[in-house]
Image (spheres, rainbow, N blue to C red):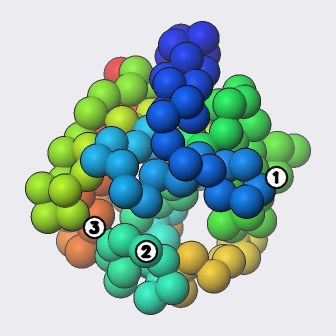
Amino acid sequence: MDEKNILNLIKKFSNKLPKFEDGRIDYSNSDEAPVITVFVKYQDKILLLKRSDKVRTYRGKWNTIAGYLDEVRPIKEKVLEEIKEEIQVFEKDILNIKYKDSYKLEDKKIKKIWIVHPVLVELKNKAEIVLDWEHIEYRWIKPVEINNFDIVTGLDKILKKVLNE
């Protein structure tokens, strides 16, 4: 992961797209969007989260922690913010964070190209998961079980990237 390249990418989007009132970049009408996809792992299991009907995309699908890179700031800050916000896990609970190379993933159904920045967060201990409004259910699963779930587009490929590189 090259932090400078990621920040430059976010700046590029920031210069051409509208902003929300709080200053974050609004990707709503963009055909491309940079995101983080954060897999949380404890021992030999990963955390899957079922998306609620209150989210904009992929309602009812299984995913992991994800978020738009909608502010020009270090990716680690965004990772820590998202895991705190979505599952109430904090930096003190983390053993290791691994960043993988970004790549483009096209979802033709929703006409969006995701610029995915995969991240693997390994926990020191099995955390007590507290879900926010974005998710309604969670499961700890073995990675080989991922295709037993109705997952968001490309999640199985992202998982292979974070575990095998």
Marks 2 and 3 close (CB-CB < 8 Å):
no
The nearer-to-camera label among 2 and 3 is 2
Residue 52 in percent (x, y) is at: 48, 84
Under circle 1, the secondary element is: loop
Q: Nearer the viewer, residue 9 or 119?
A: 9
Q: Is residue 76 above or below residue 42?
A: above
Badge 2 or badge 3: first in the primary sequence = 2
* Labelled disc at residue 90: 1
Q: Is residue 99 left or right of residue 107?
A: right
Q: Nearer the viewer, residue 87 or 164?
A: 87
Give how far apart the Cα atoms at labels 1 and 3 are. Answer: 25 Å
Q: Residues within 10 Å of mark 2 (few under 14, many from 20)?
A: few
Under circle 2, the secondary element is: loop
Which image quarter is the C terminus in? Answer: top left
**Residue at point 21% right, 63% down?**
110
Q: Amino acid at mark 3?
A: Ile
User: Mark 3 — residue?
Assistant: 151
Badge 2 or badge 1: first in the primary sequence = 2
Q: Amino acid at mark 2?
A: Arg
